[in-house]
Image: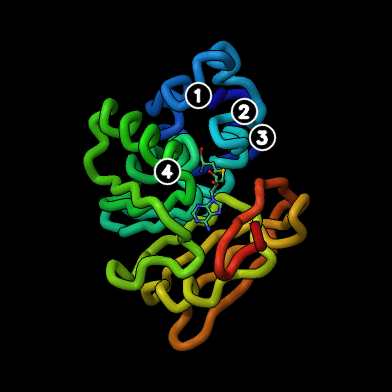
């Protein structure tokens, strides 16, 4: 997975490659599709959601440019796999999931791997989590109609945010970096995520 799908397709950040080589993806995949855990595709998880394709996890993680001291917020815990990669690269991760069964099983999967620097919270993440802000990195792993303003407000100086933005079916990755009072925005690759549902996302 790391050599062919990631390094072979242009993922260069050695820390990201090392983390993705170390965290067992099969541990976050439902038993029924475990044999496909290292294939180049998203896979179904409970509640009609998906665990993202490894390549997309790598691209988004690389864009966050994490340092070991960074504090990170993720919206859309899903299986917990992306949160595990973030936890391997940063000091602290808060991840929010709207489906309680997913939050519960992600908590168990992360706990079983001994990743004790991740907190999984159940709720609508589109308002972020102001009490724990600011964050050096914010990653949204569901497709949003636009970037939730509350998230940008919770970025630390020079903090990075990555979010798929577009329609309910297809999006473009947007990277936002805080620079002083303003922000710098860059457009990235095309992608397809399940919708971000909530107060500052899509209607249910
Ligand atoms: N990062 C996940 C995959 C994300 S799938 C992984 O590594 O497995 C997107 C997830 O976002 C789904 O589980 C969905 O329930 C969740 N989601 C959608 N809208 C949300 C919201 N407003 N707040 C929190 N989670 C949300």
**Quarter of the image holding residue 45?**
top right
**Label 4 packing within 10 angstroms: few (<14), some (14-19), many (20+):** few
Quarter of the image with the C terminus in it:
bottom right
Say above or below: 10 vs 130.
above
- Kindly identify which residue carries mark 3: 9
- Kindly identify which residue carries mark 2: 43
Per the image, label 1 sits on a secondary structure element best described as: loop
- Kindly identify which residue carries mark 1: 29
Per the image, label 4 sits on a secondary structure element best described as: helix
- Kindly identify which residue carries mark 4: 100
Q: Are marks 2 and 4 in contact (CB under 8 Å)?
A: no
Outermost residue on the bottom side: it is 181
Residue 149 x/y as whole percent: 54, 77
Disc nearer the start of the sequence (4/3): 3
**Label 1 packing within 10 angstroms: few (<14), some (14-19), many (20+):** many
Residue 138 visible in rendering: yes
Estimate the spatial distance between the alpha carbons at disc 2 and disc 1, rounded to whole Å: 8 Å
Foreground mark, 1 or 4? Answer: 4
Foreground mark, 4 or 3? Answer: 4
Q: Are marks 4 and 3 in contact (CB under 8 Å)?
A: no
Residue 14 visible in rendering: no
Estimate the spatial distance between the alpha carbons at disc 3 and disc 2, rounded to whole Å: 20 Å
Q: Are marks 2 and 1 in contact (CB under 8 Å)?
A: yes
Residue 74 x/y as whole percent: 44, 54
Quarter of the image with the N terminus in it:
top right
Foreground mark, 3 or 2? Answer: 2
Residue plotted at (51% across, 49% down): 62
For this view, does 53 lie left or right of residue 116?
Answer: right
Say above or below: 196 vs 127.
above
């Amino acid at each position: 997975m790391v050599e062919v799908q990631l390094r072979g397709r242009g993922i260069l950040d050695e820390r990201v490659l090392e983390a993705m080589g170390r965290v067992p993806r099969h541990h976050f995949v439902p038993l029924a599709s475990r044999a496909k855990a290292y294939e180049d595709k998203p896979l179904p998880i409970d509640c009609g959601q998906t665990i993202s394709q490894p390549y997309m996890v790598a691209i988004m993680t690389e864009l966050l440019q994490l340092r070991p001291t960074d504090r990170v917020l993720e919206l859309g815990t899903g299986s917990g796999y992306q949160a595990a990669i973030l936890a391997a690269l940063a000091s602290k991760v808060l991840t929010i999931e709207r489906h309680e069964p997913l939050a519960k099983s992600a908590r168990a999967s992360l706990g079983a791997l001994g990743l004790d620097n991740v907190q999984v919270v159940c709720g609508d993440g589109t308002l972020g989590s102001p009490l724990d802000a600011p964050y050096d990195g914010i990653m949204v792993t569901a497709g949003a109609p636009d970037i939730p303003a509350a998230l940008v407000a919770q970025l630390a100086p020079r903090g990075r945010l990555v979010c798929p933005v577009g329609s309910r079916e297809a999006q473009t990755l947007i990277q936002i970096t805080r620079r002083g009072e303003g922000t710098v925005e860059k457009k990235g690759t095309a992608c397809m995520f399940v919708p971000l549902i909530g107060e500052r996302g899509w209607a249910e």
